Amino acid sequence: MSSCSTSYARRRRRQRPSCRPPSCHRPTCIGTLATSYRPDVVFQVGGDKFPAHRCVLAARSPVFNAEFFGTMQESTTTTSSVIHVDDIVAPVFRALLCFLYTDSLPETRKEDEVAMYQHLLVAADRYSVERLKLICEDKLSKNIDVPRVAIILTLAEQHNCIVLKKLCLDFLSAPANLKAVMATDGFKHLSTSCPSIKKDLDAMLAS
């Protein structure tokens, strides 16, 4: 292993995303509720339907709470018994619901894990599920490499993941890593999505 890689690995161990908050969830209580009461809302995600309980989702997500019982509840989108979700694919929404009900995630094929955690990070941020967001950050921090770092950095910047962003920038501080990453499709996406980050990386390369 090169000295740059060794140094980065040491820094990454020290600067991993904040420890996951301990679960205050009671899966058995949620399970009892889920089996005792009929679902009162259905999410239509593509061709899939997901029955759910508004009170469970509201208890786990401040965004769902606001949509169902707060200032946003007047919208026909959230008062309807069927809610259409257009910007999350079904497998990711299924995993999100699984986490909200059980505080755990379903098994994912090894080759699909990183992509799943990338999408779940976006969903967790959208619905303010902070524990899930930290879990996703932690998983992604362990998969920072040349092919993936630009996409992970883009997500970190867009969803305010400060520690994850720093870990990506630490990896890119090695000139060899930065040059290799600049040739990837992920870097092209980063350049258009986060021009300020692109500018900083250009300056880093020139220094």
Image (tube, rainbow, N blue to C red):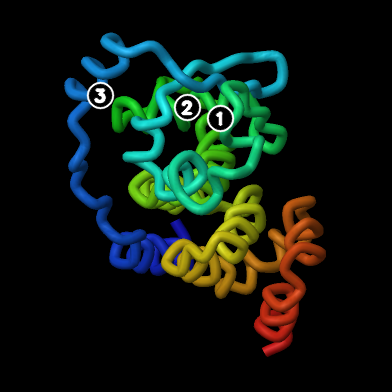
Q: Are marks 2 and 3 in contact (CB under 8 Å)?
A: no
Distance, label 2 to label 3, CA atoms, is 16 Å
Q: Residue placed at 38% from the left, 11% from the top? A: 38
SS at badge 1: helix
Side of 75 where 13 appears, left or right:
left
Q: Amino acid at mark 2?
A: Ala
Q: Which residue is mark 2?
A: 95
Q: Which label number is shown at residue 136?
A: none
Disc 3 or 1, which lies upstream in sequence? 3
Above or below 168: residue 151: above
Quarter of the image where one finds residue 205:
bottom right
| Mark-to-mark CA distance, 2 and 1 | 5 Å
Query: What amino acid is found at the position of numbered circle 1 in the picture?
Result: Val
Residue 30, disc: 3
In the image, residue 32 above or below residue 184:
above
Residue type, mark 3 in image: Ile
In 3D space, how far apart are the residues under numbered discs 3 and 1 (Cα atoms)?
21 Å
Q: Quadrant of the C terminus?
A: bottom right
Can residue 136 be seen by looking at this rendering? no
Residue 119: image location, x then y, percent: 58, 40
Q: Earlier in the sequence, mark 2 or mark 3?
A: 3
Where is 148 relative to 58, above or below? below
Residue 92 is labelled as 1
- Residue drawn 57% across and 47% down? 122
Contact between labelled residues 1 and 2, with CB atoms less than 8 Å apart: yes
